[in-house]
Amino acid sequence: MAEKKPTPRQQLVRMITGYWTSQAIHVAAKLKLADLVKDGPKSAEQLAQSTKTQPQALYRLLRALASVEIFSEDEQGRFAMTPMAECLIDQHGSMWAVAMMMGDEHFRSWGELLYSVQTGKPAFDHVFGKPVFDWLSEHPAEAKIFDAAMTGFHGPETQAMIDAYDYTGINTLVDVGGGNGTVLTAVLKKNTAMKGILYDLPGVVERAKKNLADAGLASRCQTIAGSFFEAAPPGGDAYQMRHIIHDWTDEQCHTILGHIRKVIPPHGKLLVIEMVIRPRNEFQPAKWLDLNMLVLPGGRERTEAEYAAMYAKAGFKLERIVPTPTEVSVIEGRPV
């Protein structure tokens, strides 16, 4: 017998209570429950002893998570791994850091979504007293989780991006706001004749320098510390930014692109990797990430027309948009 389709009311109830699930996943991540059961099933009592939690309460959490296929309960009341639970193991590229980040600073900021809608200003600043990136610079533990979350959240985009976009002819690629170096590492490994420059804030560059060295790219990739609000480094024939432009207001983006325009050669390429919002009622993750940009850094996702206008104002022409199998596209521009 076919499963009965939920009514509009039932669908709405699931959406309204969606944070119940996300917060339960966050607590599971914080307690590292997936790490504790990866070698075999364990009872709530055993897990409570390891996590210093109350056994019955922990059982209730695990039971609820098992009902949505995060862990599974056997006949002996022990909890075991499932494919989704495996994604919560604390390891490189997993969703563990995403669950940690989303359940802490993001959750508190989204609780003030109304403030952002009423004022157009980031709720994060309202809750924490300063912009998100300033706050992260003062909280190294959370900044480390943020870096890992970006890899976990956007990691699949990297391979999709370098498969979809042809970097042939680019001799030196400048990764503006290159973060921990993950994206630039992938591009350089595929394009073995290319050199790279990673440009980011001083504290970020120090983290990236080690990652690039560990990847065997120290001789091919230079790191430069600085702020893209103040300058862009010369020396590249292509300037790339992935998930940078969406963090900022239009005016701030014009400043960033303006600095790149000053140093990019006439034959150079501007490569902005972002989601591009499609019109009207179609479901698209970009429309929800756009709200996250409103609440956290104060930026936004944009349409093709908005990117074309932004490029033109900064002295670039939008040449083409190259889609990838993921949600992001490569928005290629050239100086005019």
Image (cartoon, helix red, strand yellow):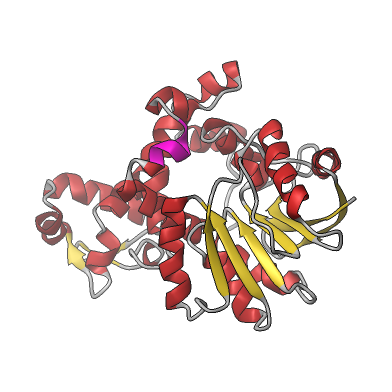
Where residue 145 appears, as percent x and y from the top left, is: 37, 53
Residue 90 visible in the picture: yes
Q: Residue at x 58, y 73 (%)?
A: 186
Q: In this view, does 183 lie above or below 100?
A: below
Q: What stretch is highlighted in magenta?
A: 131-136
Where residue 34 appears, as percent x and y from the top left, is: 29, 63
Q: Residue at x 45, y 52 (%)?
A: 202
Q: Which of 78 and 54 is in front in this view?
A: 54
Q: Which residue is drawn at 57% across and 62% down?
A: 198
Q: Is residue 87 above or below residue 241?
A: below
**Residue 278 figure quarter:** top right
Q: In this view, does 224 lie to the left or right of 84?
A: right
Q: Is residue 211 magenta?
A: no
Q: In this view, does 321 lie above or below 16?
A: below
Q: Main secondary structure of the magenta part?
A: helix
Q: Nearer the viewer, residue 336 or 37?
A: 336
Q: Does the magenta stretch include residue 133?
A: yes
Q: Residue at x 61, y 22 (%)?
A: 120
Residue 63 visible in the picture: no
Q: Which of 183 and 115 is in front in this view?
A: 183
Q: In this view, does 230 lie above or below 28?
A: above
Q: Nearer the viewer, residue 145 or 311?
A: 311
Q: In which quarter of the image is the N terminus?
A: bottom right
Where residue 173 appears, as percent x and y from the top left, is: 68, 67
| Residue at the outermost top position | 118
Where residue 148 appears, as percent x and y from the top left, is: 42, 58
